[in-house]
Image: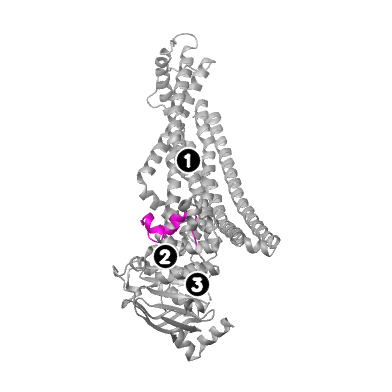
Amino acid sequence: MTAEPQRKLEPTTFRTLLVRIWGAVLAHKKLVAAAIGFGLLEAVFTKAPFLLVDPLMRAMGAQTGGSAPDAPIDPDSSFSDRFAAWFSGHADTIGGWFGRDGASAGGAAMNLVIASALLAAISGIVGGLCIYGVQLTSRFFAIKMVADLRCAIAKHILSLPLRYFGQRRMGELISNVTNDAQVLQRAFELASDNVIVDPLMILGNVAVIAVVMPKALFVLVLLIPLMAVPMYHAGRKVRKRSSRTLEAMGGATESMNQILSGIRTVKAFRLEGERLREYEEQNATFLERTVRMLRAKAMSMTQTFLGYQIGFGALMMLLGYFVLVTGEVKFSAVATVMLPLSTTYQHVKRLTRSYNTLMESVSALDRIELILQERVDDGDSGGAPLSQLRGEVELEDVWFSYGDEPVLRGVNLKVKPGLTVALVGPSGAGKSTTLDLLMRFHDPKQGRVLVDGKDLRTVCMDDYRKHTAVVSQQPFLFNASIRDNIAYGKPGCTQTEIEEAAKAANIHDFIQKMPQGYDTLAGERGCNLSGGQMQRITIARAIVRDPAILFLDEATSSLDSENEELVQRALDNLRRGRTSFVIAHRLSTISSADLIVVMEQGRIVEMGTHEELVARGGSYKRMRDLQTA
């Protein structure tokens, strides 16, 4: 079977990531509004204490021989002068709360120190609560956004056609759903609080500088391009190299998936060394590409720091000129300006790191978008309701191919309700594909599949599949109790129905002997049970469904002779009165079928009962003679 080439999509842009984030913001407006509100308060209570430095230094300077802090206020004086005078006047009131006399020696200056310390403590308490609020709301928003994305991925994967999974490596798909989503979560968690808080902190720094020394603002104008341009260029490299890193991670996950899913084969053929070498090679590739990405991120941080230091040097030159040459700025204002500028680097640094992380997440989103943009199975939505199903089935000139080579070539078959039809033939004849079309896992490329006279493409799939059941050649059990595994056939069924189905499948007595009975865990892929026990439980799952159409794909192939006879009798009872399609290689198991269809190279070459086909002496008789010989 030739798989169709996987469709390639255009890489996701950073704008696409922002659009998806914006969609999450609109979906959780209250949560985002709370985070922004807490961030704004955090910025206010973090940066406002910087304004206390100027009056505090003036008071200390006056106490050590400088000018008095309570000089008359000039209406045209700067904001720093007016604020220092105002705060000094209220500091004595605050000092009085603690029994301090502002008229005593050093009293006014000490009152100002006490007032500053008190306001700093209050700012710390309120700011700390705001930090708690920002961290809680912003990070929960980030986690909620990724959780919603995971649910969207799961919903989309379940709606994809079966052929999609034949074109993808399972390890890579698991990596998309787990590793890539985890990358997005880490990115959003890191960026959520930084992206909200740090821009507000920078605006707080700008506000402090603007009211204390507006002329120093041009330094920030210089700093922004010096730090932003390297950040932008490095971010593009981070995104490109992150994409290659995630590809290598997917390869490593696929390699481990091959080891775990095929561990019996690995052990039996002593392939441990070979599989380990392959896994180590995948990890070495992952590490090499990770180092390249880390270099790009480190270079971004280095260039950002260099830009900041250049800007800081320009600031020192500016302050020196204003204080020492022109005398336009008091020395106390210098300290007030230096504090916000010194913290600006930390805010820009966190923003740079957040930007790089978001650019790294763009590559993860690329791989997730590749899944989300795959076309869903059109048959899973819409269609005419189907409340009852008699079980009449017809294939009209059905053609189907997975690639260029047809698998089915003009198949015509009409089955009346309640008949058992056996499909036989060599491997690759098209038997399983025919069953897939009847279950509508695929649609024919040409022709029609009719159920009760209705084109299967026009029927509601939920309604149709409620009236069908399937037992496959390779039994699959979920990691749940035996009761749940049987009940999956008919959600909401009673314990009595479960036990009756188990009895019909000849597995009830075995279950009763187990220590936990029907509550016994089947294990991962049914690892706690034998192959025959697993198959009988899947048969019980089909029996409890009470289907109108039954599909059996080598349903007894995993059973020993004794169990096969018991289950075969149970299946004979189950098939009675139901339309059943059976694939079997052992012709002895289908000799009682109402109609045997012999297929070769995608065509029907013979049809009839066992006796008719044997008497005809064609392909069926040759197959029977080979098996009996």
Is there any visible trace of residue 210 in the rendered image? no
Residue 123 place in picture, x, y as percent: 44, 27
Quadrant for residue 136, please give it. Answer: top left
Q: Is the residue marked by circle 3 packed among few (<14), some (14-19), or many (20+) residues within 10 Å?
A: some
Residue 129 rendering spot, x and y as whole percentages: 43, 31
Measured as percent of width and height from the top left, residue 391 is found at 34, 74
Apparent side of residue 61 relative to residue 392 in the rendered image (left or right): right
Rounded to the nearest whole Å, what is the CA distance between mark 2 and mark 1?
A: 59 Å
Query: Does residue 95 lie above or below 460 as drawn?
Result: above
Q: Which amino acid does label 1 sit on?
A: Asp
Tell me the SS state at disc 1: helix
Camera-near label (2 vs 1) is 2
Most foreground residue, 325 or 122:
122
Q: Residue at x 42, y 38 (%)?
A: 39
| Chain-order first, disc 1 or disc 3 | 1
In this figure, which residue is indicated by the disc labeled 3?
554
Position of 486 relative to 615 (above/below): above
Q: Which amino acid does label 3 sit on?
A: Glu
CA–CA distance between discs 2 and 3? 14 Å
- Residue tagged 2: 542
Within the image, what quadrant is residue 571 found in? Answer: bottom left
Looking at the image, which residue is at 47% across and 8% down? 104
Q: Give the range drawn in magenta.
A: 476-499
Q: Quadrant of residue 628?
A: bottom right
Q: How far apart are marks 1 and 3 (CA)?
A: 63 Å
Element at badge 3? loop
Amino acid of disc 2: Ala
Residue at the image position 42 percent from the left and 36 percent from the top? 133
Nearest to N terminus: mark 2 or mark 3 = 2
Q: Which of marks 1 and 3 is in front?
A: 3
